[in-house]
Image (spheres, rainbow, N blue to C red):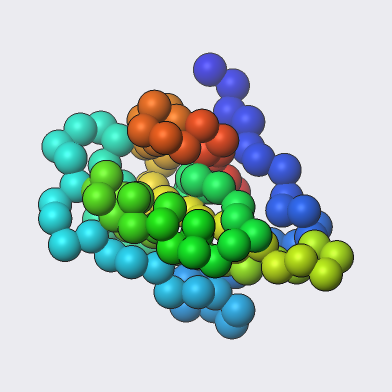
Amino acid sequence: MACQFAAPPPSGSRVPAEGEAGAVKGLVPTEKPPATATAPATGGMGAYLVAAGSFGVTANADSATARLAVLGYPGTRGRVRRGGTALVTVFARPFESSAAAFAAQDALRGQGFPDAVVIGP
């Protein structure tokens, strides 16, 4: 399977990750992630994210972040401006390998995130 990564965000610039300037802190699940190959990495920071969606309404981004947490995927968010509109992109993260990220992408597409896409180096 050839690895394909998402195009840059609509602003043309990188979305800040949690801990970077401009990032919005995400929710962390209180339950253990599912015991499957799609569970996010728990060790060091992985190089791959899965973008679950971009939202123009903050409440929708909040809902998506909470849904990711319920599914066992820690979430983080980034904010970009496109024209005069601010978009919040919700990510499931981190994944240490592309295989884990693509497995999570497939799982999330089946769990109500049809536009989930892997973001990687």
Position above or below: 49 against 86:
above
Of residues 1 and 115, the one drawn nearer to the viewer in this rendering: 115
Residue 119 placement (x, y as % from top left): 57, 46
Of residues 91 and 53, the one drawn nearer to the viewer in this rendering: 53
**Residue 13 falls left or right of residue 24:** right
Is residue 41 something that shows in the picture? no
Name, please, the residue furthest toward the top: 1
Of residues 89 and 118, the one drawn nearer to the viewer in this rendering: 89
**Residue at x 45% of width, y 30% of height:** 109
**Residue 89 falls left or right of residue 100:** right
**Residue at x 59% of width, y 21% of height:** 2
Residue 53 placement (x, y as % from top left): 55, 47
Position above or below: 13 against 68:
below
Residue 78 placement (x, y as % from top left): 57, 66
Position above or below: 40 against 87:
above
**How many numbered discs?**
0
